[in-house]
Image: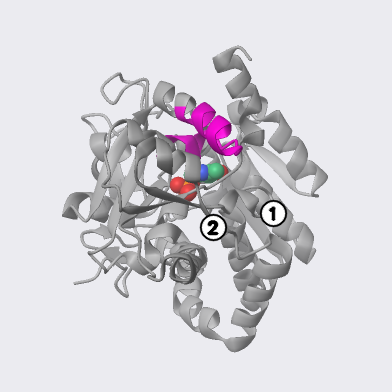
């Protein structure tokens, strides 16, 4: 029994590669090569060196004393907010740009919603001197001006997606179209553990450096490598996949996934994909997604732009349906309150995505000697305006 992907990219009944015929050569080239490339000593060496010297890894595992006192349990924070660019996403884009180079690709495309993945992609393209095109919904371009400016400053071209709801899923469709038209020279950097096989497994492996470091850091601090619980917020699920990775098959370690309930799970304005989702296919993967009776994808809502994806990665769909993971839904209000609390208790302003993970202590009690590791996926600088508006600061 394993909670990792099988060789066809299935996590239980979820995953696989449901793609148009014309995309087959692209994903097939990646599928046939990704594991071998990731194991090459020269790849490992270059990846590790960039994570250390460019990203700033290992990120600290910090014992949050005041938070622990407040909730009467032992809380550690894995500080992905201290990564270059301010979140975990760069772990994946560094891995994928090196993969693209090994595959002989000279052009990168990506999709982005809030712009965070676009920035992480534009960053590594600048680092490597590779052409970068980021697709972004026209509505999102207007909403996320600072990240659009960052991408442009980093030398990327931001192409507006003008169809449909002009948001993330439309940008993804445009990126897929581009990839079909440019199969030889272009690599598509997907930003989370979503999409057709091998993306979910490949991205999880790149992000697994998070749980690898937690194991050795906890061993140093507590004399044991395994906490009682690992906690992460879930949008597509990449920071969560990285946090759980080395614990997936160790059932002594509890897995807690935190989803965005928006204005309430049953309010009609939510992004609680597992709680509300039905089995379906989105962006080449069989998973749980929010959809209408006749299978139209429902537009998700969350105050945090990084969590409002209508689907969830297949690993998480499997963790949910198998019961291996405990899924908790957190509303906008609960998340914002938790974000302010962590800022004032620990001197760390978290991203609103991450603030959802901190809000679980309002719903979920832990034993006094439990060790709970929360992945602090990103810093809140990008969300300052949202905090200001919400709290009238
Ligand atoms: C993008 C983002 C997320 C959500 O993406 P996952 O793939 O679910 O990790 C969470 N936190 C931060 C800070 C982000 O930027």
Looking at the rendering, in which quadrant would you find the C terminus?
A: top right
Q: Quadrant of residue 362?
A: top left
Residue 79 shows in the view: yes
> Element type at marker 2?
helix
Q: Is residue 350 magenta?
A: yes
Left or right of residue 276, residue 103 in this image: right
Describe the element under mark 1 as helix, strand or loop. Answer: loop
Residue 169 is at least partly visible in this image: no
Q: Which mark is residue 180?
A: 2
Q: Position of residue 188 (x, y in %)?
A: 57, 59
Image spot of residue 322 (x, y percent): 17, 55
Q: Residue furthest bottom?
A: 41
- Labelled pair 2, 1 in contact (Cβ < 8 Å): no
Q: Is residue 151 above or below residue 370?
A: above
Q: What residue sits 40% from the left and 35% below the top?
A: 70
- Quadrant of res 248: bottom left
Q: Which residue is mark 1?
A: 84
């Amino acid at each position: 029994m394993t909670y990792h992907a099988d060789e066809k990219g299935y996590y239980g009944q979820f995953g696989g590669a449901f793609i148009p015929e014309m995309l087959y050569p692209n994903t097939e080239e990646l599928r046939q090569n990704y594991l071998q490339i990731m194991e090459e000593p020269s790849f490992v060496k270059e990846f590790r060196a960039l994570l250390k010297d460019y990203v700033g890894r290992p990120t600290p595992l910090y014992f949050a004393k005041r938070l622990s006192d407040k909730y009467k349990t032992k809380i550690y924070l894995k500080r992905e907010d201290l990564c270059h660019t301010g979140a975990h996403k760069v772990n994946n884009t560094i891995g994928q740009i090196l993969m693209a180079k090994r595959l002989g690709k000279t052009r990168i495309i990506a999709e982005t919603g809030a712009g965070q993945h676009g920035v992480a992609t534009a960053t590594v393209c600048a680092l490597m001197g590779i052409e970068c095109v980021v697709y972004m919904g026209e509505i999102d371009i207007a909403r996320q001006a600072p990240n659009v400016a960052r991408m442009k400053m980093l030398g990327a071209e931001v192409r507006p997606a003008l169809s449909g709801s002009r948001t993330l899923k439309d940008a993804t469709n445009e990126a897929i179209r581009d990839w079909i038209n440019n199969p030889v020279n272009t690599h598509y950097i997907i930003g989370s553990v979503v999409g057709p096989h091998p993306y979910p497994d490949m991205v999880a492996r790149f992000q697994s450096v998070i749980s690898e470091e937690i194991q050795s850091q906890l061993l140093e601090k507590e004399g044991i490598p395994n906490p009682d619980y690992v906690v992460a917020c879930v949008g597509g699920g990449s920071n969560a996949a990285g946090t759980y990775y080395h614990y997936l098959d160790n059932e002594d370690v509890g897995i807690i996934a935190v989803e965005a309930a928006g204005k309430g799970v049953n309010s009609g304005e939510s992004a609680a994909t597992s709680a509300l989702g039905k089995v379906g296919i989105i962006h080449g993967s069989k998973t749980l997604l929010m959809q209408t009776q006749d299978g139209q994808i429902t537009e998700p809502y969350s105050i945090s732009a990084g969590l409002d994806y209508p689907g969830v990665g297949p690993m998480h769909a499997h963790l949910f349906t198998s019961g291996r993971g405990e899924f908790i839904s957190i509303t906008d209000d609960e998340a914002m309150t938790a974000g302010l609390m962590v800022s004032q208790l620990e001197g760390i302003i978290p991203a609103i995505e991450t603030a959802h993970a901190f809000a679980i202590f309002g719903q979920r009690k832990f034993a006094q000697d439990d060790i709970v590791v929360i992945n602090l996926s990103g810093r809140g600088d990008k969300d300052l305006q949202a905090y200001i508006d919400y709290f009238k600061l």
